Image (tube, rainbow, N blue to C red):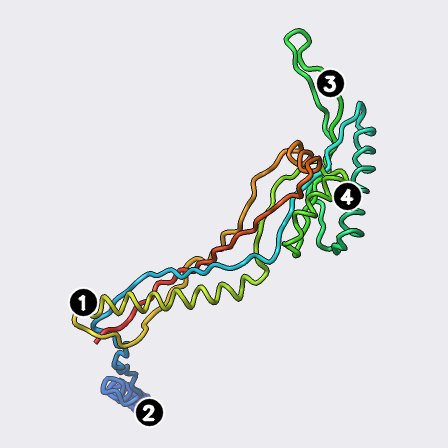
Amino acid sequence: MDNRKRTLQVLSVVLAAAVIGWFGFGRGEVGEVSAESMPAVTAATPAYTVTVGATGSIMVEPDVAYLNLAVETRGAKASEAQQANADTFAGVEKTLYEKFAIDKKDVKTTGLDVQPEYNYTEKDGRVLKGYVAVHSIQVTYRKLPEIGKLFDALTASGANRLDGVQFSTEKKDQYELDAMKKAMDNAAAKAGVLATSAKRQLKGVVNIVQGDVSDNPILYARAESMSMAKAADGAAPTSVQSGQIEISAQVTVQYEMQ
């Protein structure tokens, strides 16, 4: 009997503890988890804006020329054409490095090859004529007033092909900044006109997007070997006009109006 009583007492205590625990949890007395909504923070959007695109361009004098020229020789055998080319090119190098004191870092080889040359006839079809060796170089030259003399001297020393001349500038970074400033001035002028037409005033810049920055180098088309030979045979020295280079920049600017 005593054992039964003791068992009932234990069960009563366990049941009471369970009920209290459930009641406390249901009322949130064990702990609470809550989330508070934070007020949204948004950037103020201007009520009135105007967006314009503008270009700024400047004309500058070139300060460097890139000459692309070559020595072209022929021979019955590949070795003969190559050797003739090497002998002729030695004279070209002497003109560049000794007569005009051009730094070797300003002369780079852009092509060197020996190719077979063929004749075509209806009777025999393709017939090997010989071999052609070509050594092409690019010369960077900064004394622009003397470029005509350089052409004539190179022709006389054996350079018999001119593949093109490009006049450019080595101050592109500086000139691009000047062009961008001009583009921004033009954008402000455009936006001012539009704002005035809308009976408003410009308040400030909201956004700027930089577009392309370009320079238009002056190119002389390829001249054939006979043209260079003719210049060498003529009495008058070769005359070359470098002209001017246009450097332009584009911007898109958004302004706030009031």
How far separated are the C-alphas under marks 2 and 1?
A: 99 Å
- Residue holding disc 3: 128
Instruction: Say which residue appears at 70% left-offset and 47% top-offset.
Output: 150
Element class at badge 1: helix
Which disc is residue 6 wearing?
2
Disc 1 + disc 3, Cβ < 8 Å:
no
Image x and y of residue 71, in percent: 73, 37
Q: Earlier in the sequence, mark 4 or mark 2?
A: 2
Binning the other alpha carbons within 10 Å of mark 2 as few (below 14), some (14 to 19) or many (20 upward) gives few
Q: Which residue is mark 4?
A: 92
Mark 4, secondary structure of its residue: helix
**Looking at the image, is mark 3 or mark 4 nearer the viewer?**
4
Q: Can you give x and y, in whole percent of width and height, for residue 231 in the image?
A: 67, 37
| 155 is higher (above) or lower (below) than 29 | above
Q: CA distance from mark 1 to mark 3?
A: 76 Å
- Per the rendering, the mark at residue 197 is 1
Residue 1 visible (yes or no): no
Q: CA distance from mark 2 to mark 3?
A: 123 Å
Check disc 4: other Cα within 10 Å, few if <14, some if 14-19, many if 20+: many
Tell me the kind of residue under disc 4: Val
Look at label 2 and name its amino acid: Arg
- Among numbered discs 2 and 3, the one appearing first in the sequence: 2
Q: CA distance from mark 3 to mark 4?
A: 29 Å
